[in-house]
Image (tube, helix red, strand yellow):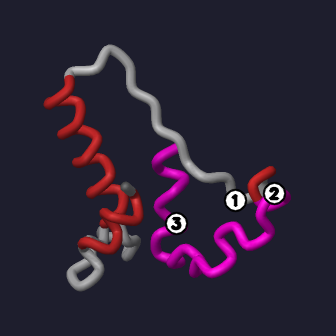
Amino acid sequence: MLYRAHFAMIRNPLINSKGMHTSALFGFINQVLKLIRQEKPDYLMAAFDSSKKTFRHELYPEYKATREKMPEEMQYQLPYLW
């Protein structure tokens, strides 16, 4: 959802007064709020990929091998979600 939000606004990114890109944060939070309104869950959990190698890399060395690095302007937004 975070990638989807970031790339949906890539041509007109949201940037705060400090110059930080906030498109991914804005889009992610809006998607979560929409989900909450529609589904009215009792609980909610979010999961993110680890930045470290996992057992999947041992099972399949090519796991995510061709994936591009996360865009830098997106990396800075991650701590605000945790």
Depth order, front residue of 45/67: 67
Q: Are marks 3 and 1 in contact (CB under 8 Å)?
A: no
Residue 55 on image: x %, y %: 80, 50
Amino acid at circle 3: Tyr
- Check residue 52 for magenta coloring: no
Q: Distance between the residues labelled 3 and 1?
A: 14 Å
Q: Distance between the residues labelled 2 and 1?
A: 17 Å
Label 2 or label 1, whichever lies nearer to me, is 2
Residue matched to label 2:
59
Q: Earlier in the sequence, mark 2 or mark 1?
A: 1
Start-end of magenta stretch: 57-82
- Check residue 69 for magenta coloring: yes
Please tell me which residue is depicted at 52% across the width and 66% down the height of the picture. Answer: 76
Q: How crowded is mark 1: few (under 14 residues within 10 Å), some or many (20 or more)?
A: few
Left or right for 48, reference 45: right
Left or right for 26, reference 38: right
Residue 3 got which mark? Answer: none
Residue 76 got which mark? Answer: 3
Q: What element carries label 1?
A: loop
Left or right for 23, reference 78: left
